[in-house]
Amino acid sequence: MNTLLYITWNVDPVAFSMGPVSVRWYGLLYALGFIVGITLLAKMFKSENCPDDWADKVLIYTIIATIVGARLGHVFFYDWAYYSQHLSEIFMVWKGGLASHGGVIAIIISSWLLCKYTFHKTFLWFGDRFMGPAVFVGAMIRLGNLMNSEIYGGPTSLPWGFQFVREFPAGTPLNMIPACHPTQLYEAGGYLLLFVLLMYLYWRTNARKKEGLICGTAFAVFFTIRFLVEFIKNDQAAFEADMVLNMGQLLSIPFILLGIFFIIYSYKQPKKS
């Protein structure tokens, strides 16, 4: 293997340390995603004369839902065989193990509760505003995965393949480390393009007057990207080895269909003033 053709990736996942506390790039990018996302959402709310505290409430609900849902998603979707025997470890998030589909499900539930009991708005009204910032957060999370050298793809001969050095024992010769698809970048790039599209639809078109159109577009495109990238991504659990479609793809299909349904629904409803 000619290692000069590939990108050697050996970035330290720890951004900096303060005494015994280490701050990781993953956490910083996660936080950046939430800061930018909630700032954008607050700007949308302000442009529509919504109460000033709505964005703060969304932030609190979303952070809790993301952490709890993503953790439970990993436990039940990917590793229940282990956690069923180690129930005390289910909420040990610091040991790793988060599943984005679980986070999405929890966010949907928390958003519905906010809409019903606090905002008194429809879920689709909120989704049309929330999904753009949420997609940006998704892109930052995937960049965090890149900094952690995790959730990458299978071997590739393409010149932008990444050799994830930290995944191999120290001292392993580079010619023994395969170049793999940087699927974190594929997803992050796709999500950022989708984010730009959603922001354009909200601010520059009348799409937000078709309730459900922006939200449906976000669901359909986001999870289609996820579905397609999974074909070249390494399995996240051993049981996926013999599956035609892996767990990530199976979990994405309902969200793709939901997005298509929202889009169709939006065109059958009268425009909102």
Image (cartoon, rainbow, N blue to C red):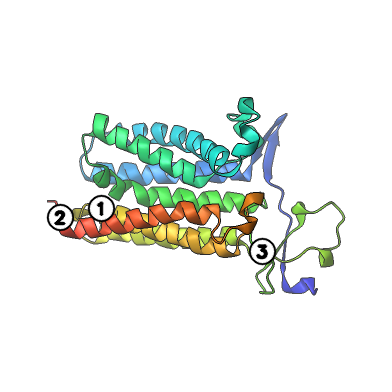
Secondary structure under tag 3 reads loop
Q: Looking at the image, is 164 positioned above or below residue 46?
A: below
Image side of residue 15 versus residue 129, left or right: right
Look at 44% across and 52% down and name the residue there: 136
Q: Which residue is mark 1?
A: 212
Q: Is residue 202 visible?
A: no
Image side of residue 254 versus residue 163, left or right: left
Q: Which of marks 2 and 3 precedes in the sequence?
A: 3
Q: Looking at the image, is 134 positioned above or below residue 181?
A: above
Three-letter amino acid code at the position of disc 1: Gly
Q: Which residue is mark 3?
A: 154
C-alpha gap between disc 1 and disc 3: 36 Å
Tally the numbered discs.
3
Q: Nearer the viewer, residue 29 or 94?
A: 94
Q: Which residue is mark 2?
A: 269
Verify CB contact (< 8 Å) between mark 1 and mark 2. yes
Q: Quadrant of residue 118?
A: top left
C-alpha gap between disc 3 and disc 2: 44 Å
Secondary structure under tag 1 reads loop
In x, y percent, where is residue 95? 66, 35
Of the numbered discs in the image, which one, if any, rests on residue 26? none
In x, y percent, where is residue 83? 62, 33
- Disc 1 packing (10 Å; few <14; some 14–19; many ≥20): many
Three-letter amino acid code at the position of disc 2: Gln
- Disc 2 packing (10 Å; few <14; some 14–19; many ≥20): few
In x, y percent, where is residue 259? 33, 56
Q: Is residue 238 visible?
A: yes
In x, y percent, where is residue 116? 25, 33
Verify CB contact (< 8 Å) between mark 1 and mark 3. no
